[in-house]
């Protein structure tokens, strides 16, 4: 360190500019280090961060059905026809080529469904009443839709053979083969609000096999209804037959089919579902519903849901009128509210306003809006939120439309602000202090050597060498070592630096300078002649 300090003092003594530049650089570093320390200690050790306590979701679903009056566009709707008594069909075995049965089933629900699974099993049951019974599997399938249809071959010879084998084993004969063709369906349906409905449906007809005939008895169609967790639903099943005939003189057709097509397969003429264009003149009524469910990843207690449904009829920018469809009603869990959309009433209001203000408009905007105010307690806090879902429609003089998504989910979070420690803050503070200390030491080192350099007297040798360098800096070249004096080389001493510089100018040669601790050597080399000047202490 002493040698480094001494050399630094000498460098400062020789070059005041070096001393000034060193001071400037160290001062700039000191300012930067001081700013770094201030910045590191101004960083907070803790920061406020929002933490999710409860994640929840609102789910709302609109649904509506448009019931029509009898009209030519869609055909007769909901016509009440007198049910004709079904006559049990009889078929003659000798002219039957193949006999097929079909079973169709439809499941409908009062709420929109997100998924349906129907597992259908068809079997034939042979029995001797009071003695024995045998179930013969025919078909088993699973379908993922509300409407299903399956068909299967009716093989009377096979059914007879099963009975014959049983009677032969037990040595008891009935003399007549009668079978129950039974279809059972297990339905699992999920609503758009996440509720699940499960139910079973069964329908059967009787097949009597005689030597020359086949006879089907019983109603081909059956329907049933049910309700579960305030969700109403209906089920309808039907058997149909197709008997393929051999060429014969009795029938003028090759196939005998059941007369009525399955009601569940025919598209319903009324009511019409959502998303269509409707014509007010043939609309009987519009029945709508709104379903809501509040979901949370933490148990919610004291749950209260206040719902209100309104209709807003307006001519945008001109006038607006609000009508209450469902007044404020309180529920404590998932709910469904039903309400009518009275097209005639809306048209009357629009016509009255139009006649009063004298403004003729061909169509109006109709908005159905449901607002649910939900409150409840969780282990992490109190929930108080409002959920809004709406359907947009347009009511004209000849058409009526409703647009928009029937389903809406709105997620939310119950959060709390907490102070969280900032990682690695102490590391930045330590590094900033160490950096400042190093810069301060560097500043003290530069100041000490600068002060000492001012007090150190420059020797005559150094003073002369410094003056020569400043005066002839374009001619004098500093070198680490001078070329050694060769054999036969002539050395001519020169009395001063100025005389040596004049000689170098005359010879167009540089002046070589070699600095040592006790002397400075200057020379000009021209071939075998060396012009030499030495400054010694």
Image (cartoon, rainbow, N blue to C red):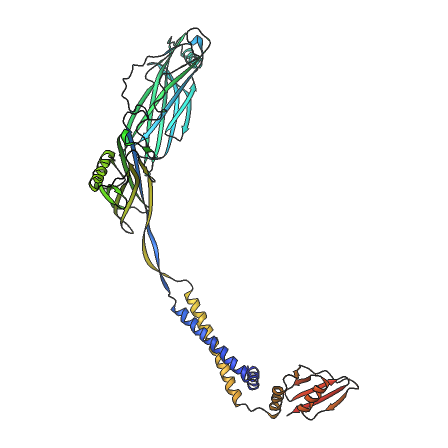
Q: Residue at horizontal 52%, vertical 90%?
A: 455
Residue 436's image quarter?
A: bottom left
**Residue 347 can be seen, yes or no:** yes
In the picture shown, does residue 426 fall above or below 266? Answer: below
Q: Residue at horizontal 32%, vertical 17%?
A: 219
Looking at the rendered image, the quarter that the C terminus falls into is bottom right
Q: Does residue 535 appear to the left or right of 225 in the view shown?
A: right
Q: Residue at horizontal 44%, vertical 75%?
A: 31
Residue 51's image quarter?
A: bottom left
**Residue 305 can be seen, yes or no:** no
Q: Does residue 46 appear to the left or right of 524 in the view shown?
A: left
Q: Residue at horizontal 34%, vertical 12%?
A: 88
Q: Nearer the viewer, residue 509 or 192?
A: 509
In the picture shown, does residue 316 fall above or below 512? Answer: above
Name the spot of residue 381 as percent of width and height, x first: 28, 52
In the picture shown, does residue 527 fall above or below 414? Answer: below
Q: Nearer the viewer, residue 267 or 294?
A: 267
Outermost residue, top side? 249
In the picture shown, does residue 287 fall above or below 13? Answer: above
Residue 143's image quarter?
A: top left
Name the spot of residue 319 as percent of width and height, x first: 24, 44
């Amino acid at each position: 360190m002493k040698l480094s300090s001494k050399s630094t003092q000498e460098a400062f003594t020789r070059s005041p500019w070096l001393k000034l530049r060193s001071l400037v650089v160290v001062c700039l570093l000191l300012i930067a280090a001081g700013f770094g320390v201030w910045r590191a200690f101004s960083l907070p050790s803790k920061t406020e961060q929002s933490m999710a306590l409860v994640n929840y979701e609102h789910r709302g679903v609109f649904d509506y059905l448009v019931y029509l009056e009898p009209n030519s566009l869609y055909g007769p709707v909901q016509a009440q026809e007198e049910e004709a008594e079904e006559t049990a069909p009889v078929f003659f075995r000798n002219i039957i080529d193949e006999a097929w049965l079909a079973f169709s089933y439809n499941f409908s629900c009062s709420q929109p469904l997100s998924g349906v699974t129907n597992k259908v099993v068809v079997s034939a049951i042979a029995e001797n009443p009071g003695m024995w019974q045998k179930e013969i599997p025919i078909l088993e399938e699973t379908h993922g839709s509300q409407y299903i249809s399956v068909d299967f071959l009716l093989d009377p010879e096979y059914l007879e053979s099963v009975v014959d084998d049983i009677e032969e084993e037990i040595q008891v004969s009935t003399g007549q083969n009668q079978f129950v063709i039974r279809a059972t369906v297990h339905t699992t349906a999920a609503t758009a609000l996440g509720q699940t409905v499960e139910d079973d449906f069964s329908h059967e007809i009787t097949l009597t096999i005689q030597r020359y005939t086949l006879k089907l008895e019983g109603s081909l169609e059956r329907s049933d209804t049910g309700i579960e967790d305030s969700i109403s639903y209906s089920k309808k099943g039907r058997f149909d037959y197709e008997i393929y005939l051999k060429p014969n003189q009795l029938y003028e057709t090759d196939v005998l089919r059941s007369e009525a097509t399955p009601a569940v397969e025919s598209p319903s003429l009324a009511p019409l579902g959502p998303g269509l264009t409707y014509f007010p003149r043939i609309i009987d009524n519009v029945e709508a519903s709104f379903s809501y469910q509040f979901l949370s990843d933490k148990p919610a207690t004291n749950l209260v849901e206040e719902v209100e449904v309104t209709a807003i009829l307006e001519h945008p920018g001109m006038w607006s009128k609000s009508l209450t469809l469902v007044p404020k009603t309180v529920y404590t869990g998932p709910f469904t509210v039903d309400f009518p959309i009275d097209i005639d009433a809306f048209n009357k209001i629009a016509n009255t306003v139009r006649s009063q203000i004298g403004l003729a408009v061909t169509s109006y905007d109709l908005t159905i809006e449901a607002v649910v105010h939900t409150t409840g307690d969780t282990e992490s806090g109190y929930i108080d939120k409002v959920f809004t879902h709406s359907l947009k429609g347009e009511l004209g003089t000849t058409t009526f439309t409703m647009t928009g998504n029937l389903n809406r989910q709105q997620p939310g979070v119950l959060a709390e602000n907490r102070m969280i420690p900032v990682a690695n803050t102490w590391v930045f503070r330590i590094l900033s202090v160490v950096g400042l200390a190093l810069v301060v030491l560097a500043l003290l080192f530069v100041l000490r050597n600068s002060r000492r350099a001012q007090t150190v007297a420059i020797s005559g040798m150094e003073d002369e060498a410094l003056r020569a360098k400043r005066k002839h800096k374009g001619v004098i070249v500093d070198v680490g070592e001078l070329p050694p004096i060769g054999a036969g080389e002539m050395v001519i001493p020169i009395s001063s630096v100025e005389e040596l510089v004049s000689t170098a100018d005359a010879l167009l040669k540089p002046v070589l300078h070699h600095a040592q601790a006790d002397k400075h050597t200057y020379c000009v080399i021209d071939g075998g002649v060396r012009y030499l000047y030495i400054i010694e202490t």
